[in-house]
Amino acid sequence: MTRLRAICTAVALVCASGQVFADAASHAASAETFLKLAHADKLGTPVYMQVQQMFAQRFEQTKAPAAKKALLETYQAKANTALDQAIGWDKLKPDMVKLYTANFSESELNDLVKFYQSPLGKKVLEKMPQLTQQSAQMTQAKLESAVPVVNKLLEDMTNELVPAAPAPAKKK
């Protein structure tokens, strides 16, 4: 009788683990669908562009002749390969899927997919990069007025924390 219970328990565990695996696979698939809609595969694009620009600027700084442009392009291609190996989508995707499945249920991911497939969701995806950039510029511009005040506060705090050096004793 106990052997029968043990077998039944084992069978139940195997069935449950199969269901958990199927649920995990489905959850991961929902995350992948969302990431595709959100163009997460393009997250590294600004990094690639910045590196390309660094190489182009260095090329200009060295006053290299135009005849050496092929050398620039060769090094830019090598840099892209190095970036692909570090942050290519095939490298980021598994971690991104884990990140999203850890933070959103499958149902929530499916709701996000539905939203981003809607006209409003598509508009959000289209406008978000521009809005993010404009928001950052606006914040930076407003922050500039606070910098002198913050620096002065930092200086005042430092002066209060570090006692002034004692005045040299006068000789009699």
Image: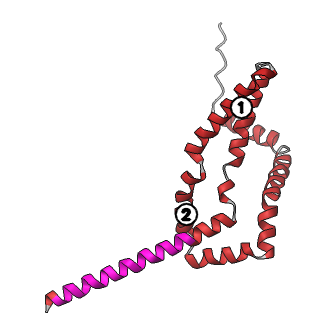
**Which residue is pictured at 82% across the width and 62% down the height?**
127
**Which residue is pictured at 17% across the width and 90% down the height?**
4
Mark 2–mark 1 distance (CA, rounded to whole Å)? 34 Å
The residue where tag 1 is placed is: 73
Looking at the rendering, the stretch of residues picked out in magenta corresponds to: 4-29
- Residue 35: where, in percent of width, then height? 64, 64
Residue 55 is drawn in which quadrant? Answer: top right
- Residue 56: where, in percent of width, then height? 76, 30
Q: In this figure, what is the number of numbered marks?
A: 2
- Residue 74: where, in percent of width, then height? 67, 30
- Colouring: secondary structure
Residue 12 belongs to the span the image colors magenta: yes
Magenta part, dominant SS? helix
Disc assigned to residue 114:
none
The residue where tag 2 is placed is: 97
**Mark closest to the chain's N terminus, 2 or 1:** 1
**Which residue is pictured at 52% across the width and 75% down the height?**
26
Residue 76 is drawn in which quadrant? Answer: top right
**Which residue is pictured at 31% across the width and 79% down the height?**
14
Q: Residues within 10 Å of mark 2 (few under 14, many from 20)?
A: many
CB atoms of marks 2 and 1 within 8 Å: no
Q: Secondary structure at mark 2?
A: helix
Type of amino acid under label 1: Glu
Q: Taking 154 as reference, is 87 left or right?
A: left
Q: Residues within 10 Å of mark 1 (few under 14, many from 20)?
A: some
Residue furthest out toward the bottom: 1
- Residue 59: where, in percent of width, then height? 75, 25
Q: Taking 81 as reference, is 115 left or right?
A: right
Image quarter in which the N terminus is found? bottom left
Q: Secondary structure at mark 1?
A: helix
